[in-house]
Amino acid sequence: DPYTLNLHSYTQIRTDRPQQTPNRQGGLVTFVSNQLPHKQITFQSQLEVQAIEIHTHTTHFTLINLYMPLTTPNTALEELGQFIEALDTPVLICGDFNAHHRVWDNKTDSRGNTLHNIIDELQLTCLNTGEHTFLARHHMHPDTTPDVTIASPTLATQAQWSVLPDQYFSDHKPIHITLNSSFTQHYTQIRWDLTRADWDAYTTDMEHNTQDTDIETFS
């Protein structure tokens, strides 16, 4: 295969597009250092997607690499949300969603609204800073940002996100993400069982702690 790229000391995880045509070629590829234990997670989706669980010496997380063509229905994002919700690790999602929202771009469309709602519902964080990642082919059209990076809060606080200036002959700019590897992460999804709450004790405690509070200080 003349398009195979091998990097020394890295494992290549490659997913070719199922239906290759002269005008539609490509797929996804992720390189993971051989020093990091990792495994690919099977995810059946309408998206072109790879999910890889990666372990470092201090933490583990799931890296999701994806491409969402304009022809893919927005319901595929809901499938992605369900997949993320079922994971027991933090996530780092890097993808060309072809989605626009004013949180990361200069316009909003329906796909962007759907993606933004999922980010909110799953309490994730968009790492984009507002810098455009796609250069318009015509000078009359504005540059945009279809490429979105999303992370769990514990990863987001340790991440640095930037756009590199060299396009390497692409109309998309490379995105550089750095994670602080010095932190230790214990990830637990907290669920409250309100049926076992002691509401009488809660009420008594609240009355005791608020009886001397000056309400005007909050106005």
Image (cartoon, rainbow, N blue to C red):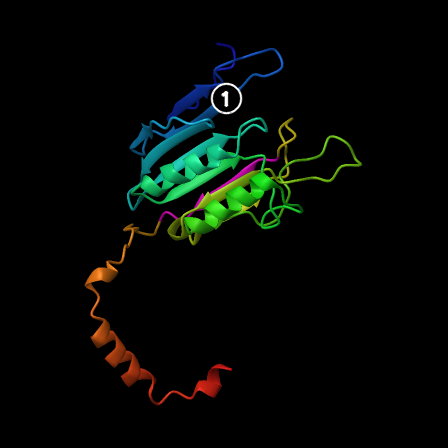
Q: Is residue 31 visible?
A: yes
Residue 55, x across and y down, in percent: 30, 38
Q: Residue at x 48, y 31 (%)?
A: 66
Q: Nearer the viewer, residue 104 or 156?
A: 104
92 relative to 158, above or below: above
Residue 138 position by quadrant:
top right
Residue 90, x across and y down, in percent: 35, 45
Give the magenta-colored segment's residue range.
Answer: 173-181
Residue 112 position by quadrant:
top right
4 relative to 78, above or below: above
Dot 1 alpha-carbon crowd within 10 angstroms: few under 14, some 14 to 19, many 20 or more: some
Q: Is residue 163 visible?
A: no
Q: Residue at x 66, y 40 (%)?
A: 144
Residue 63, x across and y down, in percent: 40, 36
Q: Is residue 155 magenta?
A: no
- In this figure, what is the number of numbered marks? 1
| Image side of residue 53 versus residue 133, left or right | left
Q: Badge 1 is on which residue?
A: 27
Q: Residue at x 63, y 28 (%)?
A: 170
What secondary structure is found at the residue carrying circle 1? strand
Q: Nearer the viewer, residue 142 or 73?
A: 73
Identified by mark 1, the residue type is Gly
| Image side of residue 41 versus residue 140, left or right | left
> Which residue extends farthest right?
140
Q: Residue at x 55, y 47 (%)?
A: 128
2 relative to 130, above or below: above
